[in-house]
């Protein structure tokens, strides 16, 4: 049994100015062949689960490519072609089983449905090939995705700490179907809801309610339920919340479960809308708190949703209000890193920080902030993730510098990376549990590593292309009406 296992993962923010070339899909680009196993074997990833399940089943495992990039603009045409070709060419050599770790919200320059286009191409090549697909909770499910795979499963957690178990769910169902012990059938549906990402935390309502209802169905009469919140910052025809149910031959049970959860989601649609308070008010509130760490969440510039990670509005407000004992992760500014490395550890430097990238889709220019500080540390920006999300993988921040202004320690990186692991600070010599304030450019993933140490959490509505204010974004392709772009719509 020849088993092809591959990864091609990207969450595309069509409003992001951050380019997505092939080189962004890993440190220097995707991994190939044995490099895939070296990078992802034994880690908390879907791909690792696929490797384990089909190795134990006696499969001859082939790993043509594994690439994952931080969310950003549509994937460049050459990058999409290169990764798709690597997978398809390996299948063409002979393939009995295919396992794919995808995302579900990939947009490329050549297609609005990166995953569906790939799967349709594969299905045309091999009409009867058994295909297992694992997707992110923020997938925008399409007909082409559903029509061209055998079984599909998505994360049940946000922050995404169940990545291995998601791959295991999809892989096990496919393995059992190959043995003939089950006959998987799938039913799915969507609702025209652009749910706010900040409302998709699976530990609390409303998302928790939908996940729990799926778990109840799994305990009763279906094999698997995946609730996809969708990725709303994608100007494609049909982004939105969807549900996929896998049952053992019982399509009626799958359909009833999917429809029931979708109905509940629509009934709770107002609960999926995030309302932000003014930035100055949030920072002022944080200033009144005494026990730390206090997390200041700069959610409008989250690189794991396509943000530039270089906007300065929240940092500027922290400085304006005089907060002290602050650590910041991170400002992505390769020019500043170059300047600070040239100055060396111990040097005092004044320079413009951040604001190097304009954001034309939201009509904002980059706004650097002038800072003066001492270079505290210089590192290569690499560390192994030890927390519950993406455990065992390597983080690659590019060259990284800590600039200490006296009141604020700012981590400045060459590459983007969301702070979901305490190693973001510890790898550069900052102990996060000892700081009063931690400013994090994140939305929800920070909760994986930082919520356990936090005494308070304050969401700060800064500037960026991951804002929850949909009025900033020029949606053109989205089929209307769509909630909450059209508040009074009926379904």
Image (spheres, grey):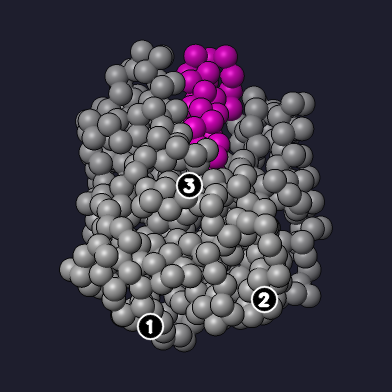
Query: Which residue is located at x 51 percent, y 27 percent?
Result: 168
Residues marked 1 and 3 touching at CB (< 8 Å)? no
Judge from the rendering whether residue 78 lies leftward or rightward of residue 74; answer left or right. Answer: left
Q: Is residue 369 above or below residue 38?
A: below
Is residue 331 or residue 117 the one in the foreground? 331
User: What's drawn in magenta, residue-wise?
Assistant: 160-184
- Asked which secondary structure carries label 2, the reply is helix
Q: Residues within 10 Å of mark 2 (few under 14, many from 20)?
A: some
On whether residue 394 falls in the magenta region, the answer is no
On whether residue 179 falls in the magenta region, the answer is yes
What separation in Å lies between label 1 and label 3 (alpha carbons)? 28 Å
- Report which residue position mark 2 lands on: 284
- Asked which secondary structure carries label 1, the reply is strand
- Report which residue position mark 1 lands on: 370
Q: Residues within 10 Å of mark 3 (few under 14, many from 20)?
A: many
Is residue 391 or residue 194 the one in the foreground? 391
What separation in Å lies between label 2 and label 1 (alpha carbons)? 22 Å
- Report which residue position mark 3 lands on: 421
Task: Label the magenta part by its dominant secondary structure.
Answer: helix
Q: Nearer the viewer, mark 1 or mark 3?
A: 1
> Quarter of the image containing the N terminus?
top left
């Amino acid at each position: 049994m020849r088993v092809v296992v591959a990864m091609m993962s990207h969450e595309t923010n069509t409003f992001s100015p951050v380019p997505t070339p092939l080189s962004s899909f890993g440190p220097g680009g995707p991994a190939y062949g044995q490099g895939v196993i070296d990078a992802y074997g034994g880690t908390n990833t879907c791909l690792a689960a696929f490797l384990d399940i089909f190795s134990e089943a006696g499969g001859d495992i082939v790993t043509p490519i594994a690439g994952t990039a931080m969310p950003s603009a549509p994937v460049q045409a050459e990058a999409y072609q290169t990764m798709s070709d690597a997978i398809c060419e390996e299948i063409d050599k002979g393939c009995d089983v295919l396992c794919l770790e995808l995302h579900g919200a990939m947009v490329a320059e050549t297609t609005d449905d990166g995953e569906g286009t790939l799967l349709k191409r594969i299905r045309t090549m091999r009409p009867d090939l058994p295909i297992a697909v694992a997707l992110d909770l923020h997938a925008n499910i399409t007909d082409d995705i559903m029509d061209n795979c055998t079984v599909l499963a998505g994360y049940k957690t946000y922050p995404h700490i169940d990545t291995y178990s998601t791959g295991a769910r999809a892989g096990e169902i496919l393995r059992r179907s190959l043995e003939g012990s089950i006959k998987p059938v799938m039913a799915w549906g969507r609702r025209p809801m652009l749910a706010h990402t900040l409302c998709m935390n699976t530990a609390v309502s409303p998302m928790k309610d939908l996940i729990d209802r799926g778990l109840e169905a799994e305990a009763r009469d279906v094999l698997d339920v995946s609730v996809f919140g969708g990725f709303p910052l994608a100007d494609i025809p049909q982004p939105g919340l969807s549900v996929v149910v896998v049952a053992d031959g019982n399509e009626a049970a799958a359909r009833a479960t999917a429809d029931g959860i979708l109905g509940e989601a629509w009934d709770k649609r107002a609960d999926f809308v995030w309302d932000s308070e003014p930035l100055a008010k949030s920072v002022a509130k944080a200033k009144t708190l005494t026990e730390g760490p206090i997390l200041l969440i700069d959610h409008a510039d989250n690189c794991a949703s396509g943000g530039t990670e270089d906007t300065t509005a929240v940092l500027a407000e922290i400085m304006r209000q005089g907060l002290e004992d602050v650590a910041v992760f991170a400002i992505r500014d390769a020019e500043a890193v170059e300047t600070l490395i040239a100055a060396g550890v111990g040097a005092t430097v004044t320079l413009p920080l951040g604001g190097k990238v304009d954001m034309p889709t939201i009509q904002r220019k980059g706004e650097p902030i002038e800072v003066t500080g001492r270079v505290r540390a210089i590192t290569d920006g690499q560390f192994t993730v030890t927390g519950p999300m993406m455990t065992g993988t390597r983080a690659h921040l590019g060259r990284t510098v800590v600039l200490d202004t006296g009141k604020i320690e700012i981590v400045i990186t060459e590459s983007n990376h969301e702070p979901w692991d305490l190693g973001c600070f510890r790898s550069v010599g900052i102990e996060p549990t000892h700081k009063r304030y931690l400013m994090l450019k994140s939305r929800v993933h920070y909760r994986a590593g930082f919520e356990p140490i936090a005494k308070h959490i304050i969401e700060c509505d800064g500037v960026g292309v991951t804002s929850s204010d949909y009025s900033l974004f020029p949606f053109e392709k989205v089929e209307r009406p769509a909630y909450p772009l059209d508040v009074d719509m009926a379904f």
